[in-house]
Image (tube, rainbow, N blue to C red):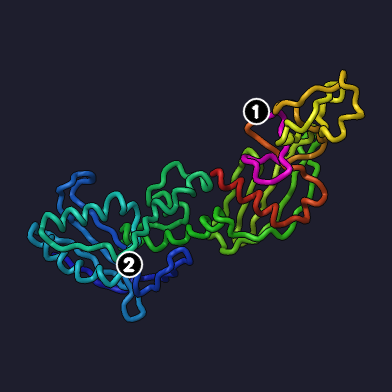
Amino acid sequence: MILQNFTFPGVITLPDKIPFPPEKTAFLDLETKAFGRKNNRILYLGLIFQENGNWQVRQWLPEQTEEEKEMLQEVLTRIPRFSCLIHYNGDCFDLPVLTRRCTALALPLDLSSSESIDLYRCFAPLKKLLGFPHLDQRSLEGFLGLERIGAWNNDLLLLPGLLAFFPYLSLLDGGFTVTQAVFKEETADQPVLSVQAELLHPVPKPFSLHLPQGYLSCQGTGFGFLLYGIRDTLKYYYPDYQNYYYLPEEDQAIHKSVADCVDPAYRKKATRNTCYIKKTGIFLPQSSPWFHPVFYRDRKDKTCYLLMDEKLTGQLQTLHDCIFHTLEQL
């Protein structure tokens, strides 16, 4: 059996999203003879773990069939010390393979005390944000500029580098602070709200993204978002339509408490579809009615709107939440 044991040639910093001390954390990768075949033996298994304050790499390559059991026996003496196992697509491949091979060789494997952190699943929300056609490990490495050269042509050794994607997840989780908002008139029909923000964690590589509701760009800790508005006359629908009359001549609803001054011939009982008032102004689209009052072009429309008035530019928390819910749709 070929055994390699050396100090990891780089720096590993665990993000806040991995709430385990380094000495309780390990990176895991394994390979089999053919992907997808349940009974294939393990041809390679590697671990990166911290020992005496340094990150160590240990790799096993059993050359003979009987050496697989010897390898797994040693691995099983190490795994119980780890509270967290980090891998890439390991929930679907590495851990099931490890479990099957231990069962086949009558070896006691207990992973109940170790939390599984599958970076493939963690980074799935980034596919649309960063424009990945695929989420395989090599695609993520390519985005960050990680190169497989010489001894680095190895999934395990490049796995810690993928932790650099966690700041992008922090952005989707609302990890930014809005610092400024300025209203701009791009054209007569396309008002724009320009929002500047600071990210809690700097992103390692700048990126930008066009969305139906706007445009965002990130570089370092800087975060900019252009929210596209519309200039229109929209409707606000009262929820308790039973307490309103609809005035066809004026195309609006009024409350029953003030309807006595209106000739009965010019009013009718309001319905869900006619119980509204109109408002002309500049509006920001919302995918869901997060912010009130909520305006619509028509009651059946899926898109709703938030009134963009002068006060909105000073409501930084509201703008933060508006951007957060926009990104949430990704």
Residue at 80% of width from left, 26% of height from top? 246
Image quadrant containing the C terminus: top right
Indicate whether residue 289 is drawn in magenta. Answer: yes
Q: Quadrant of the N terminus?
A: bottom left
Q: Nearer the viewer, mark 2 or mark 1?
A: 1
Residue 272 locus on image (x, y percent): 70, 28
Seen at 79% across and 35% down, the residue is 231
- Residue in the picture at 28% in, 72% down: 81
Q: Residues within 10 Å of mark 2 (few under 14, many from 20)?
A: many
Farthest residue, direction left: 66
**Res 300 label:** 1
Outermost residue to the bottom: 52
The residue lying toward the viewer, choosing from 162 and 104, is 104
- Residue where numbered disc 2 is placed: 26
Asked whether residue 166 appears in the rendered view, the answer is yes
Q: Position of residue 223 (x, y in %)?
A: 64, 56
Q: Amino acid at mark 1?
A: Lys
Along the polypeptide, which appears first: circle 2 or circle 1?
Answer: 2
Count of numbered circles on the image = 2
Whether residue 63 appears in magenta in the rendering, the answer is no
Q: Nearer the viewer, residue 20 or 185?
A: 20
Q: Look at the picture and state if 20 lies above or below 38.
A: below
- Mark 2 and mark 1 residues within 8 Å of each other at the beta carbon: no
Residue 17, percent across and down? 46, 63
Q: Main secondary structure of the magenta part?
A: loop
From the viewer's perspective, is 83 left or right of 317?
left
Between the C-alphas of marks 2 and 1, the distance is 52 Å
Q: Mark 1: give few (<14), some (14-19) or many (20+) Cα within 10 Å.
A: few
Magenta residues, start to end? 284-299
* Res 223 label: none
